[in-house]
Image: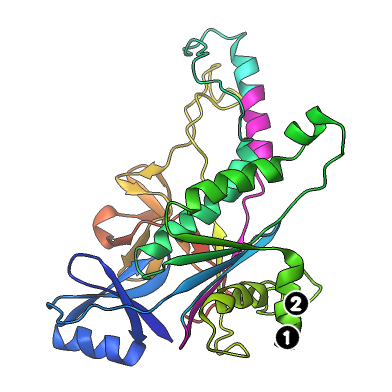
Amino acid sequence: MFVPVVDKNNKPLMPTRIGRAKRWVVSGKGTFFWKMHILCVRLNIDLSDDKTQKIAIGIDPGSKREAYTIKSKSHTYLNILSETPYWIKDVLEVRRNMRSSRRFRNCRRRKSRFDNRHKPKLPPSTKARWQLKLNICKKLLKVFPMSDFVVEDVSAKTKPGKKKWNVSFSPLEIGKKWFYVEIAKLGNLTTKQGYETKQLRDILNLRKDNDKLSDNFYAHNVDSWILSNSLVDGHVKPDNENLLKLIPLRFHRRQLHVFQPIFEGKRKNYGGTISLGFKKGCLVRHKKYGIVYVGGSSNNRITIHNIWSGKRITRNVKLYECKFLSYESMRIDDSKSFY
């Protein structure tokens, strides 16, 4: 297992073995911290050499699962399997219904704004999927010295001779173009077609599972590994098949009022992302329950959840009982993780 390393100024360095990282912490040369559920170490001493090797990240997009692999010529440092946000469309429909119902009630509401409507518009459900990829890459860049991004290019079929169909029918095409522009700002971008990935997989005699919802390495991460290996080389078969599976947390954003009245025709406010000063989803250490993440709050108490299963542990935790570790918006799946 490799641990990401950063210097005193939070500049990413080459990852190291977990044993060496522990020795640094014991001797006072380093300090452990968390980033996206990954245990990292920050050096407390000055370095005489901060050279890094070429590290690439391979990205295999998907509709239900997405794979990421961080690899250099010598080692495969990390394999991530992520689920995609599927609830955006339903949430927007609920919001639209709530706004329609408020027009017939005597309640506060803002005036319509027309200066925030522009074309072409990226559909919210599409942007959420591609924004998740971008956010994961940005967070990984803070602890890994990555310089290259390799993405398997996905495409949608178009109809020749139908201009309106080709322009507006495919959110997939609009979303990936937006993602390519944003990811190119972070490093060198390389795209490969699906048949090119298959050719590389056949050359290395690697198989791929047909079950797209499977959580093993050969369902999605074998392609992300091949993509990153195509730039840095070094291996003819995967040297690290361990997975870190991440599941995005669903936050209920602020809603003006709930649908049904609670008492005497009054509707209470609902939603928000802050619980008594803690941001929902952030990792904290509880003296009894260990490392957990923060949920909602009620009556000056916060709710904590299990980071592996997402189940609520208790809703009666005081603020001083928790020590903040890191801001997070995802949790770990308990079935596939190397922790």
Q: Where, by quadrant of the figure, is residue 327 drawn?
A: bottom left
In the image, 127 versus 309, the foreground residue is 127
Rendered location of residue 107, percent (x, y): 50, 11
Regarding residue 214, the answer to whether it shows in the image is no
| Residue 195 vertical placement versus 275 (above, below) | below
Left or right: where does residue 264 sit relative to residue 155?
left
Q: How many marks?
A: 2
| Residue 101 vertical placement versus 138 (above, below) | above
Q: Where, by quadrant of the figure, is residue 274 drawn?
A: top left
Q: CA distance from mark 2 to mark 1?
A: 6 Å
Q: Which residue is mark 1?
A: 203
Left or right: where does residue 189 sit relative to residue 294?
right
| Circle 2 crowding by C-alpha within 10 Å: few under 14, some 14–19, many from 20 | few
| Residue type beneath disc 1 | Ile
Q: Which residue is mark 2?
A: 199
The kind of secondary structure element at disc 2 is helix
Regarding residue 35, the answer to whether it shows in the image is yes
Q: Is residue 89 magenta?
A: yes
What colour scheme does the image use? rainbow
In the image, 134 versus 260, the foreground residue is 134
Q: Residue at x 66, y 73 (%)?
A: 223
| Residue 138 vertical placement versus 290 (above, below) | above
Q: Residue at x 47, y 61 (%)?
A: 188
Q: Residue at x 24, y 65 (%)?
A: 10
Pointer 2 with pointer 1, Cβ within 8 A = yes
In the picture, which quadrant includes the N terminus?
bottom left
Span of residues in magenta: 73-97
Left or right: where does residue 55 sit relative to residue 43?
right
